[in-house]
Amino acid sequence: MVADLRARMGRFASWRSVLIMFGFLFVNFVFMSPAHGLMPVFVEKVLERPPFFTSIVVSLHTAVYGAMLLVGGVSADRLGAKWTLVLGFCGAIAVGLMLSLQSSLMLLLIAPVYGLLFSFATIGSRTYLARALPLVQMGIGGAVYFLCLTVSLAVGSAFGGTIADTWGFGALGLIAIVSGLVIVPIAAWLLPSVESDREEPDTDESAEERRAAFSDYLGLLRDPRILSLCGLRFCATYFYGTMNLLLVLQLFRLTDSVTFVGLYASAILFIISPTQLVIGWAADKHGRSGPVRLAAVLVLGGAVLTTLLINNLWGLAASGLLANMGLWWFSGLYPKLVAEAGSGEEQGRLIAITEFFWALGILAGTLISGALASVFLQLPFIVCVGVTIPMFLLAILVARGYHRAPDSKTAAAG
């Protein structure tokens, strides 16, 4: 009975730290969201540049983001999850500078800095979550994590779109700068540390292991199981990169309203958010198979419908909802899938390498789609249909457990 009480108190303390982290992450992503949802509109309306310029900006910060994820997977232990995350919170300041300076050159210069800070926010928050919660709770933990992201992006899109239409993007940028200057010191003061809950690797053997960690990435890439997860991540995110660039731009062209784009992005994320909890619960309770298959069906179906209904406002909006729901479900399931793929000692590198392929997918989808859109708008979405077919096949393999470690010593086993 005493042991059970101690276990309950330990879980409460763990979730207390995680919920505080979620609170700071939510507020920060509200003010970082314009860099994702409103950037195509900002570039076309304020800077008067074509979609391909937007693809270059997004590709710059995504390339830096992906590269720094690999560095973070090896060296985040030295700085700690809390301080890595606090540094990532400076991303709101970078977003504010991009919007308030309203210069094409400054946008190109600041975008890589934003990618660097965004990678710190991602690796810091994911590492914080993994260290604070028991690994057997990662299904629901991952669902709540991505619920926090979707709701924050929803609130940020609605807030940002309204501010931009009413007072302009310059005012929105100034608000983001002020929010970052306030959030960073408060988070540094109030965010609990989770570093004391783990052993510090200070032996010569541990130092040697850290030096060899980068070569371990090559070993992971030689494993077909890990490649199946990386391929699934890449293909799904290629479509997300295209959607992030061209869907909001097409909706803006059909309505000529930044407010509509912001409210639409907000509405679909509010619709998706509660379903993520259901999917996370179902994956923990009944296994990954059904949720993974259903997410794959929604993404593939959304790609087909988006291509067919590209010039129909409400048809395009509905198709975007289906596709985004499947894509966000995949994101919420990934902490559990990665935990099933290897031991606890490998989780940092597994998180980093799968997120690296997320960045590659965004990069490829954004650049290729930005170029193809100049031919005709449906072409990049036709390519997305082709990309989501192998994604669907990989999802079937993962649903059957192909990615699982060959022994029982996985992080998912706790």
Image (cartoon, grey):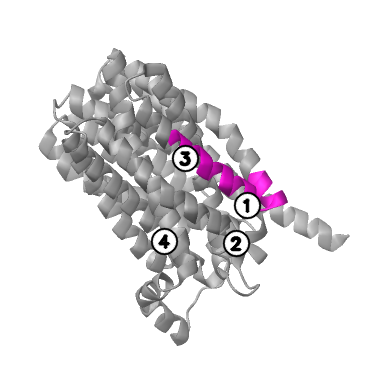
Q: Which element is circle 2 on?
A: loop
Q: Give the amino acid at mark 2.
A: Gly
Could you tell me which quadrant the N terminus lies in? bottom right
Q: Position of residue 330 (x, y in %)?
A: 51, 46
* Residue to which mark 4 is pinned: 352
The first of marks 2 and 4 along the sequence is 4
- Between discs 4 and 3, the one toward the N terminus: 3
Q: Which residue is mark 1?
A: 289
User: Which residue is at the front of the view, 297 or 336?
Assistant: 297
Q: Do the numbered discs 2 and 1 sit on residues whose CB atoms are within 8 Å?
A: yes
How busy is the neighbourhood of tag 2: few (under 14 within 10 Å), some, or many (20 plus)?
some
The kind of secondary structure element at disc 3 is: helix
Mark 2, residue position: 401
Query: Between disc 3 and disc 1, whose residue precedes?
Result: 1
Magenta residues span 280-302
Q: Which residue is mark 3?
A: 299
Q: CA distance from mark 2 to mark 3?
A: 20 Å
Q: Are marks 2 and 3 in contact (CB under 8 Å)?
A: no
Q: Is residue 413 above or below residue 91?
A: below
| Viewer-closest of 237 and 43 | 237
Report the Cα–Cα distance between label 4 and label 3: 24 Å
State which mark lies toward you, 4 or 3: 3
Distance between the alpha carbons at the discs numbered 3 and 1 = 16 Å
